[in-house]
Amino acid sequence: MTAPVTVRLASDADAPALAAFVAADAQASAFHTPAWQSAVTRACGHEAVALVAERGGGIVAMLPFHVVHSPLFGRALVSTGFAVGGGMLGDAACAEQLYAAACELAVRRNVPTIELRGGPLPQARGWHVKTDSHAGFVAPLAADDEAQLLAIPRKQRAEVRKGLAHPLEVRVGHSAQDRAMHYAVYAESVRNLGTPVFPRALFDAVLDAFGSDADILTVLHDGAPVASVLSLYHRGAVLPYWGGGTRAARTLRANDVMYYALMNHARQRGCDRFDFGRSKVDTGAYHFKRNWGFAPEPLAYAHWTADGMAPRDINPLSPRYRARIAAWQRLPLGIANRLGPWIARGLA
């Protein structure tokens, strides 16, 4: 007779067992790791919690969350905060019990929304599933630099070659200077897109928590940074996570050089896959990744809301934000960088 499954909220004493469980699960992403969970909490104050399913005294499944709180965007249990992935790990037979426990936890904590960014899809009533809003992009890395260049489709390869013809310098590191250059470039990039920048503390916390499994690659022109990306390395894949470029980067094709250089750097580190992350379907980023030869793979997300409550709306493409995005794009960079982190903490 199979032992029954029990579900409970994990305590601090469960941390070593949970870390071991995540490390052993083949489906675990970088966003399930204790490094990610703790970095988000330390930088933004969103509490990390986890529900665990046990059978015979051992953990057989877990569901991590950040308890996100924002005066602008409300409260939510998010699996996981600031991540493109998350959700349940382990025995899928435990999924519905974990999801039911998550709903109970949300009610107890007066949290009106639960968001799942991965894992088995909930089947119970009250959950809403989206399978056509986002896509992921992953492709294998080539054998060497030249093969990597030739693997890029012809039109995009021409853009990379134009960039390589400019006197650009590529730098990789974790230092205070690397961090400052990345944040300056990234902050300008997202202001130009009309969205608030995340707190500098979030990038620092992730770099500190991941150690050698994260770094910054920056492209410089005449000594000035024009494109930069903070990447995570997880189980043989590189994930360029927070990247952008200045206005000068477009003419220099510095973003194209940046991603090509990262592919080569990741291979030299021992990676065999390039995970271009997720994009909303039919957006500029979605088509940019397709132009690089990456095939979109649909991603499934789910959310639950308490009775009578509307889900959070943090989608920058939402019609309600169009005027605000246009206004944000006109803000002086200094003002955007002061206001942005306070707003962006709630966009987990």
Image (cartoon, rainbow, N blue to C red):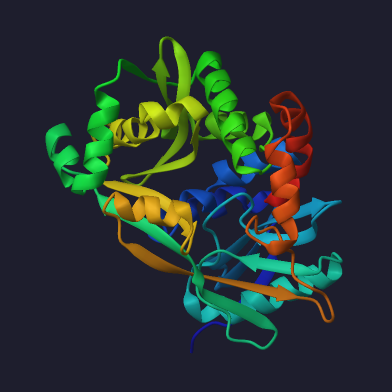
Report x, y in % for residue 305: 75, 75
22 left or right of 346?
left
Instruction: Let me know if residue 215 appears in the view.
Output: no
Q: Residue at x 12, y 39 (%)?
A: 147
Task: Write down the quadrant of residue 215 in the picture.
Answer: top left
Foreground of the two, 61 or 238: 238
Instruction: Let me know if residue 110 appears in the view.
Output: yes
181 left or right of 77?
left
Is 255 rendered above or below residue 89? above
Task: Write down the quadrant of residue 51 in the picture.
Answer: bottom right
Report x, y in % for residue 161: 22, 31
Is 201 rendered above or below residue 130? above
Q: Residue at x 72, y 40 (%)?
A: 328
295 left or right of 131?
left
Q: Residue at x 57, y 44 (%)?
A: 36
Report x, y in % for residue 41: 70, 42
Foreground of the two, 123 or 320: 320
